[in-house]
Amino acid sequence: MNIFNQAVSWVLPIIPKSIVKKVSERYIAGATLDDAMRTVRSLNAKGAMATVDVLGEFIHNLKQACDNTKYCCEVLRRQNKEGVNANLSIKLTSLGLAIDIAECEKNVREILITARENGNRFVRMDMENSPYTQQTIDLYRKLRKEFNNVGLVLQAYLRRTESDIDMLLKEGAALQIRTNIRLCKGIYVEAEEIAYKNREEIQHNYMRCLERLVSGGAYVGIATHDDVLIGEAKKLISKHNLTNDAFEFQMLLGVRDQVRDHLIREGYRLRVYVPFGEDWYGYSIRRLKENPQMAGYITKALLTGK
């Protein structure tokens, strides 16, 4: 990251929301479900699968959790009705995890049942920041015993992730359940005692975790835009003679589209993460901080209004 891009990243919180919104349009499908479905259809036409995320984590009351649950269920019904190649990603804090764990579980069950009733759509439980790591893993462990359409996200920058993988694989084998994990680097700001900070350390741990998942027979969503990790993942896929039903690459909407298209042309299955909704600002700030090269787009918008 050069000094200019880093500086813009630091001042993101005071940049006018109108500018952030303009820049973040590449990351977010729009405000409505119609916008999201339009994006999903476009991605499908290009050979990509999709996973849809209703924005709105870190809510303040259970009424919001109930509303978000209903909206997630509507997404699943629309996906099934239109026959698109897509599934759903959910953030548990948007469903009440930080307020009432029992209510959150109830909401997730409603979503999973709706998914099962609508073509047995797959639902991925996103991983959020560290206060919710264990609770998220625990709920996944519980629900996968009852539902075959649920998966989890693990973050390679967390020091605990290797041991979490070992536990989940061992438990899955005992239950004769295939563990289904999206492996990403992680974007939340965490303390050094629980998270790797150096880029090379994170890359190395990512590959250690990916090796464990692959050798353990898990289905893996290889979620990265990192050229090094993509290259190493391809080597691992070849080493283990993995077929396309054992893994997929995953990327964010609007990030490195050329790399996405190249992977598809090479014959890899690829899924794009498609967020949408009114609550776009927090998501946008996190993504812009993670991708400081977007500083150039922000500066252009500030100077030209375009």
Image: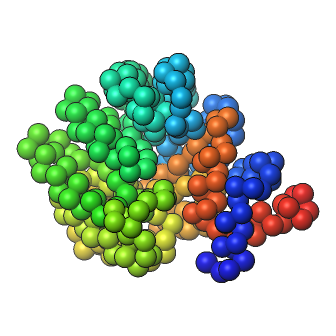
Q: Residue 41's spot in the image, x, y percent?
A: 61, 41
Tell me how the rendering is colored: rainbow
What quarter of the picture does the N terminus occupy? Answer: bottom right
Residue 67 placement, left or right of 194 = right
Q: Position of residue 280 (x, y in %)?
A: 65, 42
Residue at 34% across, 75% down: 204
Comparing 8 with 38, the one in front is 8
* Quadrant occupied by the C terminus: bottom right
Seen in the picture, residue 32 relative to 13 is either above or below; the reply is above
Q: Position of residue 227 (x, y in %)?
A: 49, 75
Q: Is residue 9 left or right of residue 111?
A: right
Where is residue 190 shown, x and y percent of the image?
A: 43, 60
Taking the spot 52% from the left edge, 37% from the top edge, the residue there is: 58
Q: Residue at x 49, y 43 (%)?
A: 51
**Do we see residue 140 in this rendering?**
no
Question: Which residue is at a point 57% across and 35% down the rendered structure image?
Answer: 56
